[in-house]
Image (cartoon, rainbow, N blue to C red):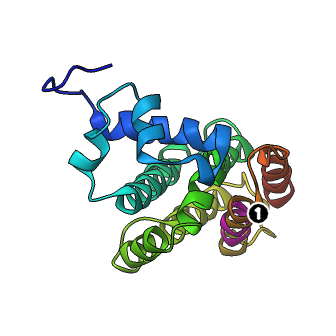
Amino acid sequence: MSPRGVATPDVRERLFAAAERVLERGGPGALTSRAVTTEAECAKGLLHTHFAGLDEFVAELCLDRFARTAARAEALAGLVGERTVAENLGAVALALLDSGGPAVAAAAMTRPAAALRVREALEAGAPGFAAIEGSIARYLVTERRRGRVAATVDPEAAALAVVGAAHHLLMTSQPGTADPRARMTRLVAALVGG
């Protein structure tokens, strides 16, 4: 436990990672500021020192994870011609579901103020599903030009399918249910032929 008055390094990420563990174990109902700070092994008031409250914390966690995945999707442009298209696209598709994705999404959806904050941030241009979809489509267009994706593959439709499936899995998966990653991997393989 960090002693009072001692700086906690990387506090946002430490709290976010702790929240993901709490959510994975107990679902949205288990998420409290005390549960997060206990899991993070830090002072009980640390979360409220850095966030206006639990709703803001949950919204920022959700937006942070969207931004990370959007950056990973954008990095697809640098992977053109490397490994297989299914492996490259699959890594991004699975990133949508990683880091407790279903549990984080469920937490945001069960907290109306957090959900509103996320929606407003996305509408204001924060990276989210639309940015991820655009990056995937651009990647597939490039790979199709190189002949690594069949000419019959519609990059925009495939990108929409991946992001839409991830959204569906995030909204319908519950802690303790079957891992959705296998379904996503099969979808990616079906879309790009591999």
Q: Amino acid at mark 1?
A: Thr
Whether residue 163 is in magenta: the answer is yes
Above or below for 42 versus 176: above
Compared across the picture, whether 64 is left or right of 52 comes to right
Residue 35 position within the rendered picture, expressed as x and y whole percent measured from the top left = 48, 39
**Can residue 24 be seen in this snapshot?**
yes
Whether residue 24 is in magenta: the answer is no
Q: Majority secondary structure of the magenta segment?
A: helix
Residue 173 or residue 129, whichever sits in front:
173
Above or below for 177 versus 108: above
Residue 153 or residue 89, whichever sits in front:
89
Magenta-colored span? 160-166
Q: Residue shown at 44%/49% (left/top)?
A: 68
Displayed quadrant of residue 172: bottom right
Residue 170 position within the rendered picture, expressed as x and y whole percent measured from the top left = 68, 59
Q: Residue shown at 27%/21% (left/top)?
A: 2
Please state the total of marks drawn on the protein image: 1
Q: Residue shown at 43%/30% (left/top)?
A: 38
**Can residue 139 be seen in this snapshot?**
no
Compared across the picture, whether 93 is left or right of 45 comes to right
Q: Residue shown at 66%/37% (left/top)?
A: 25
Question: Circle 1 sits in a helix, a strand or a loop, which is it?
Answer: helix
Residue 11 or residue 89, whichever sits in front:
11
* Residue position for label 1: 172
Residue 15 position within the rendered picture, expressed as x and y whole percent measured from the top left = 38, 38
Residue 92 position within the rendered picture, expressed as x and y whole percent measured from the top left = 61, 48
Quarter of the image where the N terminus is located: top left
